[in-house]
Image (spheres, rainbow, N blue to C red):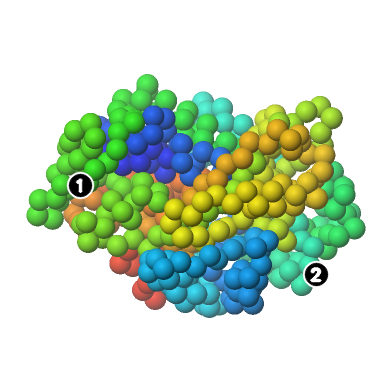
Amino acid sequence: MNVCVLGGGVIGVTTAYLLAREGCQVTVVEQHRQVGHETSFANGAQLCYSYVAPLAAPSVFSHLPKWLFDRNAPLRFLPSLDPDQWVWSLKFLLQCTSERSRQSTVELQRLSAYSKQVMDEILSNESIDFDFTQTGKLVIYRDADDFAAARRQVEIQSWSGVVQTVLDARSCVEKEPALQSMEQVLAGGIFTPTEGAGDCYVFTRELARISAAKYGVNFVNGTKLLGLRQEGDRIVAARTSGGDVNADFFVVALGNGSREALAPLGVRLPLLPLKGYSLTLPIGEKHAAPTISVTDVHHKIVYARLGSRLRIAGMVDMTPAGYRDDPRRVELLKAQAQSVMPNAGDFTKAEVWTGFRPATPDSRPVLGCSGVSNLRLNAGHGALGFTLACASARLVVDEICGVPTALDLAPYSLTGRNSRRQYGAVT
């Protein structure tokens, strides 16, 4: 079977790799000269399988005034005349009920648990050096009420087998000495030993190399998708700047470009690009960088060590399309990070990156059937692309190959995501 994967980010490359392992002839069409050069390039680097709560939550309503009027808010909304932004925002607010937020959390937890299984299986089969560590994740809290809510969540998650430890401020510093300057303002933290981190771009690049050399995947890089040619209820070719690509199946894994590519077919994806920022610092011998992944809940900033580098990422900007980068946000991220870990690395040599996370209103990716018989979707992972990539790819590949999927695809499909479902145990 010939399959064309549109998009060479971590989602598309992982999909191509698993398809090729099933014996498919795979072609990947990527507009950049190398894979992984958009959202996958310099993201937060954390593999957070136990922390996959949706952005839409009941607490959103109390934060709205700050998001609208405080330029230093970790999540900032900049309104525009773009109707798509307003439609997405309304759908987002409708997801901010306790029932819907819990439903999305359960479904994201199922997907993330499965993603860890698939990632472990890939790493057991392939030798991939992407600065991967599994030293755990520490989430720190400054507000006593937030910390109390986190402790309750630990009790809730314990029934599903998630192992976590509640730490006071002193224990947080003992667990991660890089937080020493924070001890007096910390309410406490939650440590999860099974979480990991790694360089998403390097993982994507190396998996692409293995896919081509070992499994024969054809990467057509530097090639722009011009459209999809449809005959009846099937796609017969992807029209590209390098000519037509014919295949039996097509997978759309274009991230933020997925909505535009599918619109001419009448397929409407509920996606909005959410801008995020990251810094990558060199770590010298004199610097006290963290050895475990850290999330600062107050500022919504994550820290992940990648070999001799430190990745710092945070902020969410709901901005109009084409809105220019805001250097004040970069400086704010840098200042907030230095206030938490002043000696973590050389901030004067920080590499700055801005990326757009393709997000759905409920934070669940859009997977599987598109309404066109031989066109499958794998898009809309938001800030969880690296974490959810392996499960998303496995589910889409199994559906294409006619293999029973490990999870029900309905909660993540275009047609099934809004149907009512019973909550079940997260396995």
Q: Is residue 250 above or below residue 100?
A: above
Q: Position of residue 342 (x, y in %)?
A: 82, 43
Left or right of residue 173, residue 21 in this image: left
In the rendered image, the residue lying farthest to the top is: 213
Residue 11 visible in the shown view: yes
Q: Quadrant of residue 187?
A: bottom right
Circle 2: residue type:
Ala
Spot occupied by residue 416 in the image (x, y as percentages of width and height):
33, 67
* Res 423 seen here: no
Q: Amino acid at mark 1?
A: Leu
Residue in view at x 40 percent, y 49 percent: 255
- Horizontal side of 283 relative to 386 (left or right) equals right
Figure check: 256 above or below 157: above
Left or right: residue 264 versus residue 421 is left
Which residue is more in the foreground, 344 or 186? Answer: 344
Judge from the rendering whether residue 300 lies leftward or rightward of residue 355; answer left or right: right
Seen from the viewer's position, the closer of residues 310 and 141 is 310
Q: Mark 2 or 1 closer to N-term?
A: 2
Q: Residue at x 90, y 58 (%)?
A: 184
Please tell me which residue is depicted at 14% across the width and 50% down the height of the picture.
230
Disc number at residue 228? Answer: 1
In the rendered view of the protein, which quadrant contains the N terminus?
top left
Give the number of the disc on residue 144: 2
Disc 2: CA contacts within 10 A as few (<14), some (14-19) or many (>=20) = few
Q: Residue at x 52, y 61 (%)?
A: 318
Badge 1: few (under 14), some or many (20 or more) residues near its Cα, within 10 Å?
Answer: many
Q: CA distance from mark 2 to mark 1?
A: 53 Å
Q: Secondary structure at mark 1?
A: strand
Q: How many marks?
A: 2
* Residue 111 percent coordinates (x, y): 47, 55
Residue 345 in the image: x percent, y percent?
A: 76, 36
